[in-house]
Image (spheres, rainbow, N blue to C red):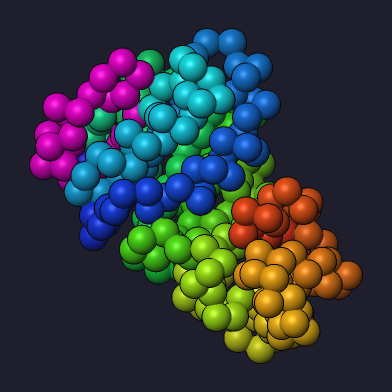
Amino acid sequence: MARPEGTATRGTTHPNRLRRMDRWIAATLGPALRRAGPPPLAVDLGYGASPRTAVELLTRLRSVRADALVTGVEIDAERVAAARPHERDGLTFLRGGFELPLPGGRRPLLIRAANVLRQYPEEQVAGAWARLCSRLAPDGLLVEGTCDEIGRRHVWVALGPEGPRTVTFAARLGSLRTPSDLAERLPKALIHRNVPGEPVHAFLRDFDRAWASAAPYGALGARQRWLRATGELARDWPLTDGPHRRRQGEVTLPWHALAPRR
């Protein structure tokens, strides 16, 4: 076997760490999951020292499509060996990296790469994205992003076979001081762009202003404050989600609105 492409992650895994990302995936990818002919396949790339995230992903996808399949892919052979006893109907584990060595060259409907690219230089992100997107099924989705250790704060990019589509910010609202707290979880493609003159910096600045303006609504709870702030933010930024998703502590924008300036 050729050497897998990539570098092992730190391997940190906590229960339900990726629940916010998974919840968004299940809602966004739901129509494609339901209309897929053969059982749809998802890949949990770089699942870490424990197979927990792959097990949780299978459960969440099967709430939408009962015959969904998940394959966990890890570059570390010891992690794969430790995960194998957890295999079950619909859940398998393979050693590999960005090349995704799936049997028969099968193309997955979903590739989830959480907390994987943060350890790479920024200049390598576009190549990794292109490599992974080339492996997707025609209506597939790559979700790549970062979260904190217990899943309170997430930011991720969703990409189709053609490239990046959207950026989503998600938080446990009760723990959020200001929206710009999410800056520390920006994915690698954006984290070094949170500086004056870059769109992501302007977005987080405006979000903080809207959050401050919505402070009186905090008496009704953090969710009501978030809804008011995102409603105000939508006057100047092209938010793509509606109130239902925002009630979950999410806000999504098209990639072009936050893409780095070159």
Instruction: Pinpoint residue 201: horizontal percent, then vertical percent.
Output: 65, 81
Q: Which quadrant of the structure image shows residue 161?
A: top right
Q: The magenta stretch spans which residues?
A: 71-92
Q: Nearer the viewer, residue 221 or 167?
A: 221
Instruction: Locate residue 39 relative to residue 3 in the image: left or right.
Output: right
Placement of the N terminus among the 4 image quadrants: top left
Residue 246 visible from this viewpoint: yes
Q: Residue furthest bottom?
A: 196
Q: Residue at x 51, y 51 (%)?
A: 20
Q: Which quadrant of the structure image shows residue 149?
A: bottom left
Q: Residue at x 68, y 77 (%)?
A: 219
Instruction: Locate residue 160 relative to residue 146 in the image: left or right.
Output: right
Q: Nearer the viewer, residue 211 or 118?
A: 211
Instruction: Pinpoint residue 243: horizontal percent, then vertical percent.
Output: 77, 53
Instruction: Locate residue 215 relative to residue 63 in the image: left or right.
Output: right
Instruction: Pinpoint residue 21: horizontal percent, then vertical percent.
Output: 51, 49
Q: Is residue 229 above or below residue 92?
A: below
Residue 138 visible from this viewpoint: no
Q: Is residue 243 above or below residue 138?
A: below
